[in-house]
């Protein structure tokens, strides 16, 4: 039986989202999400299903807030779409996930000052409300308050990444390559088509591959873990690389999947990734996500005991607090990522990328 995306019994705030009329119920949203994660992991649910549940809950929250914002501002002056980017676009979130969003609106309103003011106000309301609900602001500024443009401008950006890819630009653009419509009536198929074209272009593939091998797992000689001060950043040294590898191989396969596991499976089905590498990466992604979620739950407990404040989450797992078998699993997972990165680097000749 398929695990439900989220359980409103564990997250009453989500169950009430369709009926709330003010932002007050959102003050307890962070605690409700923590309760959801703790309950789901305690009952033995797969960490990737729990991560998806967080993303789906944040989807429901975002859609309801957009309805309330439109009721406050009035009907939008032209069709638009609220874009979910990054981990939200992939529906793969943990307790530390921040806001990644943008607004695309109808190109016919490009020079309309009324539209410009409306979407600026909408973005301001939304970013503030999501922050109140406990979703941190994006340090890189990838939020609708900074990214609200006519669809044609986004298409031009995507076209530039595909036709004249540059390493720095693509690293900055990574958050946009997981773009997904969260709510709205503006069709963004043109962006999907541009990415599909990119999957057929050698230079774009090479740049994507270069990005996919940039985040190196902390593995030394003989596959030994190389922690820094007994700590391993399981996002930077693990899950980030898997996300990039999955995106690369899915694009080469011509897939339009938005999430990491479906991307890996689509790549395996198309033959751009072997079945064994697909299975190994999915297992590694699940383990690393589980470590991230459990570590962040520990941070919640520690913050509560110390000050009663909300935890400041990170992805820095202390390996001396892991059991022997857990350390062995972590080592095996990171070794898989490193090995597939090495194969990827040779296959796409990333050494030629400048």
Image (cartoon, rainbow, N blue to C red):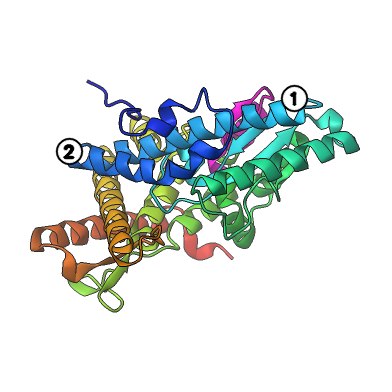
Q: What secondary structure is marked by label 2?
A: loop
Residue indicated by mark 1 = 79
Front residue of this view, candidates 265 and 285: 285
Q: In which quarter of the image is residue 277?
A: top left
| Residue 17 screen position, x and y as percent | 49, 28
What is the spatial separation of the Cα atoms under label 2 and label 1, in whole angstroms?
43 Å
**Residue drawn at 41 percent across, 42 percent down:** 92
Q: Does the magenta stretch include residue 178?
A: yes
Find residue 69 and report its image quarter: top right
Q: The N terminus lies in which quarter of the figure?
A: top left
- Give percent across and percent down for residue 172: 60, 57
Q: Which residue is drawn at 17% across and 71% down?
A: 320
Residue 152 located left or right of residue 9: right
Magenta stretch in the rendered image = 177-196
Residues at badges 2 and 1 in contact (C-beta under 8 Å)? Answer: no
Question: Which residue lies at the image location 53% right of the left edge and 27% below the top edge?
Answer: 20
Work out whether residue 268 can be spotted.
yes
Q: Residues within 10 Å of mark 1 (few under 14, many from 20)?
A: some
Q: In the displayed structure, would residue 173 be above or below residue 79?
A: below
Name the residue at the bottom extreme. Answer: 229
Visible residue check, residue 193? no
Image quarter in which the C terminus is found: bottom right
Category of crowding for the residue at label 2, using alpha-carbon neighbours closer than 10 angstroms: few (below 14), some (14–19), many (at least 20): few
Q: Is residue 91 above or below residue 163?
A: above
Image coordinates of residue 216 in percent, x first then y, are: 37, 65
* Res. 101 image quadrant: top right
Q: In this view, does 331 lie to the left or right of 173?
A: left
User: In the image, residue 205 lies at what x, y percent?
Assistant: 53, 48
Query: Residue tagged by mark 2?
Result: 44
- Tag of residue 291: none
Residue situated in front as seen by the camera: 307 or 285: 307
Q: Nearer the viewer, residue 275 or 50?
A: 50
């Amino acid at each position: 039986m398929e695990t439900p995306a989220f359980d409103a019994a564990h997250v009453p705030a989500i169950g009430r989202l369709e009926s709330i009329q003010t932002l007050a119920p959102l003050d307890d949203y962070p605690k409700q999400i923590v309760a959801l994660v703790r309950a789901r992991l305690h009952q033995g649910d797969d960490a990737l299903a729990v991560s998806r549940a967080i993303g789906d809950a944040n989807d429901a929250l975002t859609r309801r807030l957009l309805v309330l914002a439109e009721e406050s501002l009035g009907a939008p002056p032209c069709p638009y779409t609220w874009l979910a980017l990054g981990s939200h676009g992939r529906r793969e979130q943990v307790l530390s996930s921040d806001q990644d969003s943008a607004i695309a609106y109808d190109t016919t309103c490009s020079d309309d000052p009324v539209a410009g003011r409306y979407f600026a106000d909408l973005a301001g309301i939304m970013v503030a409300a999501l922050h109140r609900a406990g979703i941190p602001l994006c340090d890189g500024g990838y939020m609708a308050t900074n990214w609200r443009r006519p669809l044609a401008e986004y298409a031009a950006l995507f076209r530039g990444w595909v036709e004249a890819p540059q390493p720095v630009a693509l690293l900055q653009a990574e958050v946009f390559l997981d773009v997904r419509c969260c709510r709205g009536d503006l069709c963004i198929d043109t962006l999907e088509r541009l990415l599909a074209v990119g999957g057929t272009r050698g230079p774009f593939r090479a740049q994507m591959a270069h990005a996919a091998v940039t985040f190196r797992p902390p593995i030394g000689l003989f596959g030994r873990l190389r922690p820094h001060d007994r700590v391993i950043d399981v996002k930077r040294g693990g899950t980030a690389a898997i996300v990039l590898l999955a995106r690369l191989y899915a694009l080469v396969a011509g897939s339009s999947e938005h999430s990491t596991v479906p991307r890996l499976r689509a790549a395996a089905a198309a033959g751009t990734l072997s079945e064994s590498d697909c299975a190994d990466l999915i297992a590694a992604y699940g383990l690393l996500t589980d470590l991230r979620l459990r570590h962040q739950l520990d941070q919640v407990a520690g913050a509560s005991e110390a000050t009663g404040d909300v935890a400041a989450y990170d992805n820095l797992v202390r390996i001396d607090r892991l059991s022997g078998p857990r350390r062995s699993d972590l080592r095996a997972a990171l070794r898989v990522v490193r090995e597939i990165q090495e194969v990827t680097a040779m296959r796409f000749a990333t050494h030629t990328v400048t």
